[in-house]
């Protein structure tokens, strides 16, 4: 679990539902750089390998998205209006 809403699993509409017996805090360094990258892959295996390489390089990502041609075409149609 991460983020700033740590009470949600413990507090519900009926009151306290759980007790944390151990909490681990991971502090991340301030980012040295922020960038956006768009990459095109011809097949899903090349895409999978790129994702595996990025994760194994311990690069901190805010997000990663895979879109096939159907999704890309839908976005392009909607954004042209």
Image (tube, helix red, strand yellow):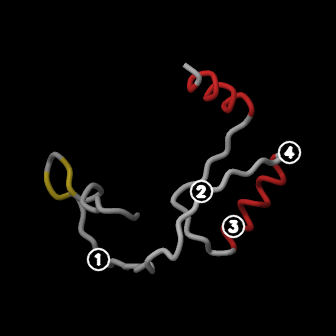
In this picture, residue 3 sits left or right of residue 60 = left
Cα–Cα gap, marks 3 and 1: 34 Å
Q: Nearer the viewer, mark 3 or mark 1?
A: 3
Vertical placement of residue 25 versus 81, above or below: below
Counting residues from the start of the chain, the first of labels 4 and 2 encountered is: 2
Numbered label tally: 4
Residue annotated with mark 1? 21
Q: CA distance from mark 2 to mark 3?
A: 14 Å
**Alpha carbon of mark 2 to alpha carbon of mark 1: how far?**
39 Å
List x then y, in percent, for residue 44: 81, 47
Q: On the rendered image, what quadrant is the C terminus found in?
A: top right
Which residue is painted at 62% across and 48% down in the image? 65
Marks 2 and 3 in Cβ contact (< 8 Å): no
Residue designated by label 3: 54
Callout in the foreground (2, 3) = 2
Residue 31 rendering spot, x and y as whole percentages: 48, 74
Q: Which residue is mark 2?
A: 36
Q: Secondary structure at mark 2?
A: loop
Left or right of residue 80: residue 47: right
The correct choice, above or below, for 18 with respect to 72 in the image is below
Per the image, label 1 sits on a secondary structure element best described as loop
**81 in relation to 57, above or below:** above
Q: What mark, if any, has residue 5 been given in the picture?
A: none
Give the secondary structure at mark 4: loop
Indicate the quadrant where residue 63 lies: bottom right
Q: Earlier in the sequence, mark 1 or mark 4?
A: 1
- Looking at marks 3 and 4 on the same chain, the residue that comes earlier in the sequence is marked by 4
Determine crowd level at label 4: few under 14, some 14-19, many 20+ residues with C-alpha closer than 10 A: few
């Amino acid at each position: 679990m991460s983020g700033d809403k740590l009470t949600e699993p413990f507090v519900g509409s009926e009151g306290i539902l759980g007790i944390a017996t151990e909490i681990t805090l991971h502090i991340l360094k301030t980012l040295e750089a922020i960038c956006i990258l768009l990459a095109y892959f011809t097949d899903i295996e090349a895409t999978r390998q790129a994702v595996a390489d990025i994760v194994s390089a311990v690069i901190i990502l805010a997000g990663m998205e895979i879109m096939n041609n159907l999704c890309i075409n839908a976005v392009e149609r909607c954004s042209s209006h």
